[in-house]
Amino acid sequence: MRESKTSPSPEAPLPDSPADSDTGLVNKTTLVDHADGEGDVLPLANSVGDGRPEAMRVCINTQTPLLQFAAAAKDGRAMWELEPDFSKLEEGVDYRFSPGGVTRMVYPLAKRLLAEGVWEEVHWVALNPQAPETVHLTDGITLHNISVDPGRLDGYGKAKETIWTRVHGVPSPTQPTDLFWTDDFTEYTYYNRTTAELIRELDRRVDFDAFYIHDFQQLPVGQMLGTVKPKLFRWHIPFDVRAIPASWRAPISSYLSAYDVVVVSADRYRSALKRYGHRGPVALLYPYVDPSEYGRPSATDVQATCERFQIAADADVVLVVARMDPAKAQDRVIAAVAKLVHSFPHLRLVLAGNGSFSNSRVGLRLSKSESWRRHLEEVAEEHGVSDRVVFTGHVTQRELECLYERCAFTVLPSVREGFGLVVVESWLFGKPAVVSRRAGIADLIDDGQNGLLFDPDDPVGLEHAMTRLLHDPGPLRERLSRHGRRTARRCSIEAAVRSEARLFRRVQEG
C-alpha cells in the first residue's frame, strides 16, 4: 500500500448510500450503510492528516473496451500502430464508444469519482486487439489495451460464450458441460493470465489501492493477481444456481473467494450466491445510468429518425432495445405482435440494437448476432408480420433518444437478464415498461404500479400486458410512468457515486 499523502478532495463530504433496505452485505460487516441518501452525511474513515479522505489509485478491468478504434487514422496508418494524442481524435471518425454497460455505467462512474476526488488515478485494462496499446484520455483515465493471438482468442471466445449461454438459459446442445477440461478453457485461462500479468506490471509502476474487476469474462483475474490489496468483482450477468452445472461449482467458488467483495445487481443474485455456498461479503448495488447523458430530442429529430426507419406517424410503436442475442428473446415479442395486430392495426414493433463487442469486427468476431437477426426475420415472415417489424441495427445515442420519445412503451422480454437498464431509460423518458420476471430489475417492480411483469415462457401473459397498455393510453400509462420515474432515482449515477465510493472506502479499511 502507498503511504498517506495529501491529495485533493471534494468540497463537501461524501454523502451516504441510497435508501434501499436491501442494500448491503450478507455475512461479515455491512459495507453499504442504510440511509435515505438525502439526509445527514456520514464521515468516511481512512483519511489523511487533515481529516479529508485519501484519494485512491484504481485499476479497472473489463473484457469490453471503452473505445473501439477505426481501422486507419487520418494519415492512413492503422490506428493501433500509433500512440495517439486523444485530444486530436474525433469521435465517430477515429473511434467510437462501445455499446453497453461499459459506456453506460463504468465510464461515467470513473469520471465522477475522479472529479469528486474519491479516486485520484484510473487505469483501465481491456481486451482490444485492434487498438493502440496505451491511450491517455483527456479526463485522466489511461486505457491499456490487450491483444491476444487470433488463434488463441478464438478458443477464449468459445469458452466465454459457453459460460454466457449456460448462465442465461440458452445453452447449445453442442456446448460441453465439462468446460473446465476443454482446450477452449485453456485459452480462456491464458487470456485471463495475460490480463493479470499486465495489471501486475502496472501495479509495480502505479501502486494501486484497489482493483475493480468486471464480469464473468475476467473472473479468474482476482486469483491470478497474487496480491493482498483490495479486489472487488462486479458480477453483471444473472446468477441462477439451477443454470450452473455441478462440475463448475468448485472452480467458480474458488475464483469468487479470491475477491474481498462480490458486487451483484439484484437481491435474487445475492441470495443465490449464499445458496451456492459463497461465504464472502456480497454487496447489492443497482446498475445505473447518468440522466444528464440523455437529452429530450426535438420534434424535427424524432421525425427524421422515424422517416429513416419508415415508422408511420400514426403507428403505435412498441420498442425493444437489446442486442441481437437469443437470451434477449425478441422472437417472443414478434409472436405477441402477430396475435395483437388484428385488434391494433397500427401496431409496429421496433427492434433497436445490433451485436455486442464480442460479435463486432474489432472484437471476437462471433457470428451469433447475425444468425439471431436472420432467425428473427424468419419468425416475422412465418407469422406474417414482416411489414410490422422494424430492425434498426446499431443506432446513435440521438436516434435512441428519438425512439424512446416516439414509442408508446417498451418491452424487456429476456429469458434471463442480469439487470435491464433499458427499463431505467424508458422511465427517464416517461415511458411504461413491460418486463420479464427473469430480469434483475424485476426485483424493483411492483406489478401494475411502476411496470408490468410477465413470464417469458407465458405468451398469453405477454400479450395481456401489451394489450392493457394498448387499450389504456391514459391512467395506466400515466401511473406506470410516474412511479417509474421515482424508481429510476435508485438507478442513477448520483446513487451509484455515493454507494460505490463508500464501498471502496470500507473495503480499503478492511
Image (tube, rainbow, N blue to C red):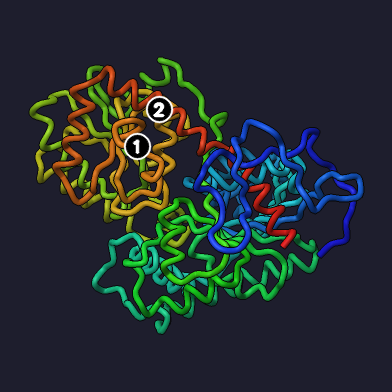
Q: Vertically, is 299 above or below 112?
A: above
> Which residue is under mark 2?
483
Please tell me which residue is depicted at 59% across the width and 44% down the height of the picture.
34
| Label 1 crowd (10 A; few <14 / some 14-19 / many >=20) | some
207 relative to 163 in the view: left or right: right
Question: In the image, what residue type sits under mark 1?
Answer: Asp
**Residue 482 spot, x, y in % from top left:** 40, 23
Distance from disc 2 to disc 1, alpha carbons, whole Å, reads 9 Å
Please tell me which residue is depicted at 56% across the width and 63% down the height of the picture.
27
Observer-nearest residue: 22 or 60?
Answer: 22
Task: Identify the disc placed on residue 334.
Answer: none
Observer-nearest residue: 1 or 15?
Answer: 15
283 relative to 275 in the view: left or right: right
Please tell me which residue is depicted at 24% across the width and 72% down the height of the picture.
173
> Which residue is under mark 1?
446
Please tell me which residue is depicted at 30% across the width and 36% down the height of the picture.
447
| Label 2 crowd (10 A; few <14 / some 14-19 / many >=20) | some
Q: Quadrant of the N terminus?
A: bottom right
Question: In the image, what residue type sits under mark 2?
Answer: His
**Residue 449 spot, x, y in % from top left:** 33, 30
Q: Quadrant of the C terminus?
A: bottom right
Query: What is the secondary structure assignment of the residue under circle 2?
Result: helix
Observer-nearest residue: 117 or 454?
Answer: 454
Residue 388 falls in which quadrant of the image? top left
505 relative to 69 in the view: left or right: right
Of marks 2 and 1, which one's residue comes earlier in the chain?
1
**Residue 300 spot, x, y in % from top left:** 41, 15
Query: What is the secondary structure assignment of the residue under circle 1?
Result: loop
Count the numbered circles shown. Answer: 2
Residue 80 falls in which quadrant of the image? bottom right
Q: Vertically, is 345 above or below 110?
A: above
**Residue 508 spot, x, y in % from top left:** 73, 59
